[in-house]
Amino acid sequence: MSTVRSWLVLALAAIAVASLGLVACGSDDDGGGDPTATSIPEITVGDDEPAFLGVQVSPQPRKPDFVLTDTSGEDYDITAETEGYLTLLYVGYTHCPDVCPTHMLDIARTLDDLGPEIADRVKVVFVTSDPERDTPEAMRTWLDAFDERFIGLTGDTEDLENLQRQLGMNPAQKVPLNDKGDYAVDHGAYVLAFTAEDNLAHLVYPLGVTRDAWAHDIKKLVEEGWTES
Amino acid sequence: MNRITLVRRGFVALALVSLVSLALVACGDDDDDDGDSNGGDHSTGSATIGDIAIEGAYARESVTDVAAVYMTIKNSGAADTLLSVSADVGSEAQLHEVVDSSMRQMEGGIPIPENGEVTLKTGGLHVMILGIEGGLKADSTEVHLTLTFENAGSVELTAPVQALNGDGEMDHDMDDDKE
C-alpha cells in the first residue's frame, strides 16, 4: 500500500507542479500576457515523504486578512471568522461548468461522509473571481446546491485581486466564449487548506484529488493538526 | 501549432489523473467508477456511429445557466475528429479543455486517435453548454446531444443528468487498511 501511496503523492505533485508552475507563468500561450505575473512569488513543491495526500507548498501562503461581503450582504472578516478552524479556501465563480463545481462537490460529499464531528471544525470559504455575476444571492443559491454551510464572499475588484495575489495566484481574467457576452474566468484552480494552528496553507489540492484523499487529509488535519512530516 | 502542444499537455495531465484514480480503485473496493461520476445510466449515455462508440455520457446538474457534459469516445478505426456538439438545451454547446487552470475552446474540434479513445472528464476536456435558462435539473431532465465527427458523421446521444447532491462516489468505506 505504501507504494500506491507514494505513487499517488508523486502523481499529485506532478499535476500540482504543472498547474502551479503555469499559474505563476501567466497565460502567454494565448497572447493575453499578464503584467502582474512577474510579482507572483514562486511556489515550489516539497519533496519530503508527506503524511498528507495534498500537495505541500513552500512558501506557505498566509490566510488572507480581508473583510469581504458574505452571502447575506454582511461584512465577513476572514481572519476573525475562521480563527481556530481548518479553512478550505477556493477562488472560483458560479458560471464555471467544470473545475469549480467539482471541487465544491468533492468537499461537500467528503464532509458529509466524515460527519458533523469533523465537518463542524472546518470552514469552506468560496471567494468569487467574478463579482460582476456572483451577487451574494447568486452565490448562496449556487453554494446551497453543494452544502448550506459553505461561505460565499465577494467584494470590490481591487480587494478580490489583491487577495488572489497574496495567495500567489494570478488575478482571475475574463475569457470571452462568444460574441454575445458570455465569458469564462480563468483563475487558480486549486483549493488551499489553511490549518487551524498557524493559519498557513501548507497544503493545496489541485483537481484530480480523490475524495479518499480529501477525507484522509481533512480528518487528519482536524484531529491531529498540521505536522511537518 | 500552439494548440497541438497544449492538447498533448492536456493528455498527459489526463493520463496522470486517470492513473491516480486507477491506483486508488485497485487498492480500494470493487467499484469500477473513477470517483468523478456515478457513471450515469449505461442504458443511455451511449451511441455508436461507424468506428466511433460513445460511452458513459452524462451532464452535471447545474444551478447557473451553464453545464458540462462528459463522456468517453472510443475509436476502432482511423483517426477522426469530434468537430462539434449541439444540444437541445441552452443557447450553444462548445468543446472546451481545461489546461493549467485555463479554459480554452477547441476551435478545431477534439482529435480522436486511430484505434484509441478520448475521455471527456473533469479537469480536462468537456462539452460546455451555455445559456440554459433556469439551469439543468437532475432527474427531470435528459440532454439530447448531436455529435458531429469529421469522418464518422453525426450521431445522436441522450445524456442523463447527474445530481449534485447524489452520492455519486465510490468511497463507501474509508479504506482504513491504507494507513
Image (tube, rainbow, N blue to C red):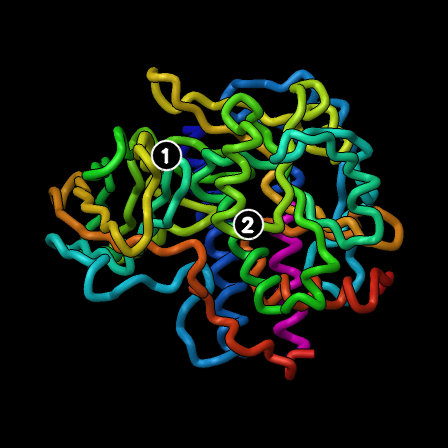
- Identity, as a three-letter code, of the amino acid under mark 1: Asp
How far apart marks 2 and 1 lie (CA) works out to 17 Å
Identify the secondary structure beneath mark 2. Answer: helix
CB atoms of marks 2 and 1 within 8 Å? no
Residue A130 visible at all = yes
- Across and down, in percent, residue A203 comes to 74, 52
Q: Residue at x 48, y 48 (%)?
A: A145
- Disc 1: which chain? B
A134 or B160, which lies in front? A134
Residue A68 relative to residue A147: left or right: right
Q: Evaluate whether label 2 is on the same chain as label 1.
A: no
Q: Chain of mark 2?
A: A
Where residue A188 sits, quadrant-wise, is top right
Where A33 falls versus B45 (above or below)? above
Disc number at residue A104?
2
For the record, the magenta segment spans: A2-17
Task: Give the amino acid at mark 2.
Answer: Met
Is there any visible trace of residue B94 in the rendered image? no
Q: Which is more toward the observer, B53 or A224? A: A224
Q: Position of residue A61 (x, y in %)?
A: 80, 40
Q: Tell me what residue is drawn at x 14 percent, y 56 percent.
A: B48
Q: Spot the residue most to the bottom.
A: B177
The label on residue B65 is: 1
Is the residue marked by circle 2 packed among few (<14), some (14-19), or many (20+) residues within 10 Å? Answer: many
